[in-house]
Every structure is written in C-alpha cells, then in structure tokens.
Amino acid sequence: MRTLVAYFSQTGKTKLVAEAIYESIEGERELKELGQVESLEGYDLSFIGFPIIAFGPAKEGKEFLEQKAAGRKVALFITHAAPEDMAGIEAWLDKCRAAAASADLVGFFDCQGELSEAIAAALLKSDDPALRSFGERRPETVGQPDETRLQRARDFAREVMARVEG
C-alpha cells in the first residue's frame, strides 16, 4: 500500500503531528508539505493535516481537499489552539470534515497545538471579549502537542492503516 502524509503548518506544530503519523506507517510512504503535492493519484491512502485558522480549516487545507481529494481515501489530522474538550470546537472540526466531503473520509484526528505569539497578540487587541480571552490562553498552549497527543496521533495512524488494509 502506498501512503502519503501531507500537511500545512504555520508554527511547525502540525508538522510534528505529521511526522508522528509518518513514523507509525509501514510500507511505501511519503511525507510532504501540501504545497509539494500535485495530485493524490497513485496513493492508496492520504493523511492530510492542517491547523484551524479563524475557526475553520486553514485556507491551504480547505482548497487542497476541494481540488484534489475527490474520491480518494483520506484521513484528516487537525491541530487547533483549543483544548480538545472546549465548547464549540466541534463546529470548527465540522468545517474541516465538510471541506473533505468529496473524499472517502476514513479517519479523523484532532489535537491541541500551540497558539502563535502573533495571533495571540492580535486576539488580545480585539474588541470582542471572547477573542481576547482566547488570546490570553496562549500560555496554556505552549508546548502542544505534547508527547501524549503525539502518541495519540501515532495510534490513530496505526488504527487507520489497519482498517484500510482490511
């Protein structure tokens, strides 16, 4: 089975998850940034990852899925600066699933990543108290994804591979 792990990462944290997934895959595999992927042709399975930006999928991830994933077996991995159990996060993740609507979605993983300093600074200047509050939570995100979350990503990759290989 030929497997691709492709990702878009702003801060390097989604890349960490991509590398954890990649190292858990046996057989023929490739690790690439989304911008390096011309097509999903020739791959039996593609793990596609990107962060949540502005409460939805990163533009790069959304466009990639809409343009290149139709009919292909895809497993998504998403990073976000929020704790996984935060109220409202499911709506953000649903937007990621919707971007992959034309694909054969065979797996979905999400975990907390790190809120960038620049985005936190912008949020802190917002007139919206909810956005300011989110910016204030940056210290809680530093160092994420931690080893526990990376291990969950490895387990996710092995589970998806086992399911797809039958």
Image: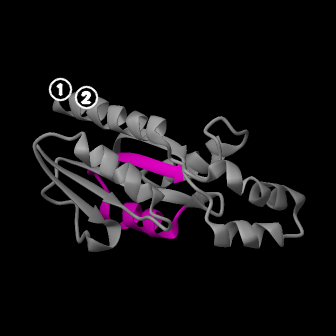
Towards the viewer: 87 or 43? 87
Quadrant in the picture for residue 34: bottom left
Judge whether residue 63 is colored magenta: yes
Badge 2, how many Cα within 10 Å: few under 14, some, many 20+? few
Residue 119 in picture, x, y percent from top left: 67, 69
124 vs 164, left or right, is right
Quadrant in the picture for residue 133: bottom right
Judged from the image, the secondary structure of the residue bearing numbered disc 2 is helix
Inter-mark Cα distance, 2 to 1: 5 Å
Residue 73 in view here: no
Disc 2 target residue: 163
Quarter of the figure with the C terminus? top left
Badge number at residue 166: 1
Instruction: Say what amino acid the circle numbered 2 marks.
Output: Arg
Q: Is residue 157 above or below residue 40?
A: above
Q: Is residue 42 above or below residue 153?
A: below
Residue depicted at x 34% and y 52%: 18
Tell me where the magenta segment starts and ends, as one range: 57-79
Towards the viewer: 92 or 69? 92
Q: Is residue 143 above or below residue 153?
A: below
Residue depicted at x 40% and y 47%: 76
Residue 4 in picture, x, y percent from top left: 22, 54
Judge whether residue 74 is colored magenta: yes
Towards the viewer: 69 or 140? 140
Residue depicted at x 70% and y 56%: 138
Residue depicted at x 79% and y 57%: 136
Give yes or no for contact between labels 2 and 1 (Cβ–Cβ under 8 Å). Answer: yes
Badge 1, how many Cα within 10 Å: few under 14, some, many 20+? few
Residue 144 in picture, x, y percent from top left: 54, 49
Judged from the image, the secondary structure of the residue bearing numbered disc 1 is loop
Instruction: Say what amino acid the circle numbered 1 marks.
Output: Gly
